[in-house]
Amino acid sequence: MRIKLFHPMIALCAWSIVLQAQQIPEPPPNTFPIWNCSIPGAKETDDAPKPEIIVPNRPRTFYQLTQVSQPTLSVFRPDNPHPSQISVLVIPGGGLQRLAIEHEGYEVAEWLNRQGITAFVLKYRVPGPVDWGLSDAQRSMRWIRKLSKQYDLDPDNVGVVGFSAGGEIGTRMAALGDSSNYEATDSLDQLRCDPDFFGLIYTGGLVEWRSRELKTEIREALTSVENPVFIAHAMNDSFQNSLELLNHLAGIKTPVELHLYQSGGHGFGVRHSAFTASRWTSDWLDFLESRGHLRPRNVKIYGQQFALDLSQSNTLQPLSSFETDADLETAYLAQKAFVESWIHETGTRIGGFKGAAASKSAQESNGLPGPMSAVLFRSGWISAKADLKLPRLDPDPCAVETEIGYFFGADVPYEILNEEQLRSIVEWIAPVIELPANYSHKMKGKGVTDGIAANVGSHRYIVGKRVAAQTIDPDKLQIELHHEGSLEHAVKGSAAHRGQWGNLLKIVNQTIAQGYTIQRGQVILGGALGPIRAAKPGKYEANFGELGNIEFEITE
């Protein structure tokens, strides 16, 4: 048998032909080097850097680059930018030896653009240690924030999506937060480098080869990650990387979500496939929306500004001054932005939820499909007691409302389908006096959307003694409010549109639709029963029939 051997020179010629055939594509428009100074970690050498090449003899349906010594960032702008002004740094994979920049970089950017999202594709140094890619990624985050004004982006809504080795770089960015991986080189390095959210797609390099446990260096570095992390992997790939990462992040209370798909393999990028893993793109968008990253920026700014002005007793701007065509959906998004900002500013937590415009006439006159809903803060909770005295100004004047409060026997994060199910979960009923703030002297907006965005003035509320729900029919309660011995109003529980249970069902499902879980121990108010009256100095007595009384005094 004769065996033909290739001559070395013939092989060398063949190799040269391969290299010549695979020309390096022209870089996309708006591509620039990310270092305008010495590159951190670069080796000191007199030799000229090798030219970038497309990896030869590696059959793939996409090209990969290697010998990258000058990292760059390419900007991809959408035709119709998303109102959230969100942007994403795209980090392709390639095992830190090469870059799958075509299908895990440029194609991802094109997909993001179709969603209205601005994309920045990073071409980082390879082959090399992960620290090189990490430094290049952190520098890129700073570039994006520097360019945010030029490109009309939100500098506080910049995330990362990393694939394979790019996911490892993203994980290490999460571990470092805003701590830099390299010494500052210029003024750009004073900007934030921590992503506001993460997408880690079929991440590799996180677990030990033998133990299949998270590498010690990564586990010890990941001590606190507050920004949300989305993880996606296929089960017919090395999904232990993502599974171990999930377990660790969950242990340190990171807002994290893992999508482990039955099939898809490795390296699927954003290309369409019949395998379930190709659905990760829509799942990630849903995740970003649930975490508020797709909220219109004007709405986000409104919520933050309203919280700041409220804390400093400044003049309050109505939502209509930020969004002239705000609808109910926009108003609730603004309300949630305010709630998140207020919790962050004050350190309080959610004490419950409330309805407003509970009567049929109030809903019809305001063109509402049901009652409005709002959040009650735990800092405003006041337990009823003898000789209770409360200031009328705190710092704003308040109203006095008689309401019925409901307590669930378990946490409820999902829609309740009917009144029968609702009754089964309500464990306690209590009398409540709400003292909502009156912002009319600070805020000119008087429309429904402005009121919803301002959280319907939710401030203080007095909660009376709880009574077992099975013993009370809230529709039959006769409620009277007296001020200094004179009757202010008398009303029945059934005054609420659709009755107490029908009204409560609307409030509960609307609250859940806003992304909240109603937790056991929180109170849900059904809305004002009777006229809403401005608080006056003096003694009040509210009689709730079988639920008992609440007595309090309003002082100047």
Image (tube, helix red, strand yellow):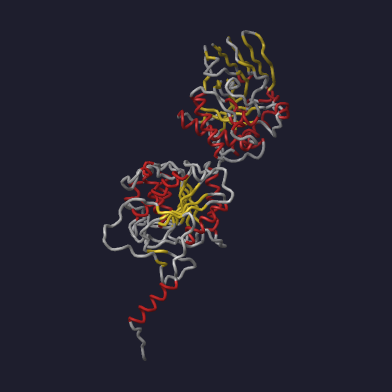
Residue 134 locus on image (x, y percent): 37, 52
Residue 434 in sight here: no
Residue 504 in sight here: yes
Q: Splitting the image into 4 quarters, where does residue 72 fall?
A: bottom left
Quarter holding the N terminus is bottom left
Quarter holding the C terminus is top right
Q: Splitting the image into 4 quarters, where does residue 19 fall?
A: bottom left
Which residue does the image show at 35% across and 48% down from the upper left?
219
Number of numbered labels in the structure image? 0
Residue 498 locus on image (x, y percent): 71, 30
Q: Residue furthest bottom?
A: 1
User: Which of 429/290 is in front?
Assistant: 290
Residue 256 in the image: above or below residue 530: below
User: Which of 319/403 is in front?
Assistant: 319
Residue 195 in the image: above or below residue 350: below
User: Which of 172/259 is in front?
Assistant: 172
**In the image, is 548 to the left or to the right of 50?**
right
Q: Splitting the image into 4 quarters, where does residue 71 fall?
A: bottom left
Residue 285 locus on image (x, y percent): 54, 49
User: Which of 376/195 is in front?
Assistant: 195
Residue 110 in the image: above or below residue 333: below
Residue 294 locus on image (x, y percent): 55, 44
Residue 418 in the image: above or below residue 233: above
**In the image, is 345 to the left or to the right of 130?**
right
